[in-house]
Image (cartoon, rainbow, N blue to C red):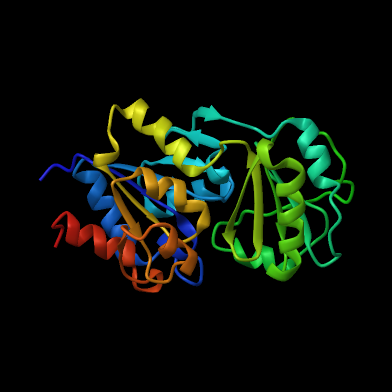
Amino acid sequence: MNIDALIVSDLDNTLLNTDHRLDPLTIETFQEMERRGAVLAIASGRHYRDIRAVREQLGVEAYIISTNGAHLYDPRDQLVSERLLPAALVHDLTLLDKPDSVRLNVYTGSGWLIDAPDQRLLAFHHSTGFVYEVDPALRGKARDDVGKVLFIGDPSELAPIEREIRERFGGQVHVTYSLPDSLEVMARDVNKGRALGVLLEILGMTPAQCVAFGDNLNDVEMLELAEGACVMENANPLLFEALPHAKVIGHHDQAGVARELRSRFALD
């Protein structure tokens, strides 16, 4: 059976397990989906280079929506579309007051910059080998190559930073969380759903042909667009409230995405 569909999945707490790794069933399923003609895409808040390493582990060709939709790459690693934060906003965002325990990060087209070392974050990306570059002078730089400014720390410390961002820059930026401890700021209208819309147009496909998987608030727009929206059992409770009509599937630690695809497309 040929599969005429676009399959797009988030990574953390969706396609990847708690150890940030791929289940063998997930790898087998995505390779079978590709053999049957499905178009595949990975959509994540992670950096393109980080996602590319996961795509290599999957052993498939896939489009990459990275940095929450700031960048779209084709399976040959060619940049298809990009929307960056204005340099003046990068300058202002990186100067916001924050506790010393909150890490300031920026994702540029080429890499990941952080204001101070944090071994916990390296462990998070251990399976891909993607690492940050420490830049103690990160604050106040008006860079024109930034897709995302992110603040990583305890949610209670991030909440006042989020409020200030919304009050000062609300109409100029898109603010979301990919994890409870990761407050992420992109240019206005940058989100996974917008990038998915661009991809559907390129492919000449419709939302009715799209099956999408996600677990957190940075997946809302993508799941609203895809008619085959699937929310993980382990998702952020706020996602269930935002998408009451989405299908709830299995847990990410039980290869929930792969099991749903195998059932939906009769792969077993």
Front position in the image: 165 or 209 = 165
Occupied quadrant, residue 88: top right
Residue 260: x and y, percent?
A: 25, 62
Is residue 113 in view from this perspective?
no
Q: How many marks?
A: 0
Occupied quadrant, residue 142: top right
Residue 107: x and y, percent?
A: 68, 44
Residue 53: x and y, percent?
A: 51, 50
> From the viewer's perspective, is residue 197 above or below residue 117?
above
Residue at the spot 71% in from the left edge and 55% down from the top edge: 162
* Residue that protrudes farthest toward the front in the picture: 167
> From the viewer's perspective, is residue 164 above or below residue 74?
below
Residue at the spot 24% in from the left edge and 57% down from the top edge: 261
Residue at the spot 37% in from the left edge and 67% down from the top edge: 23
Front position in the image: 259 or 164 = 164
Quadrant where the C terminus is found in the figure = bottom left
Is residue 5 in view from this perspective?
yes
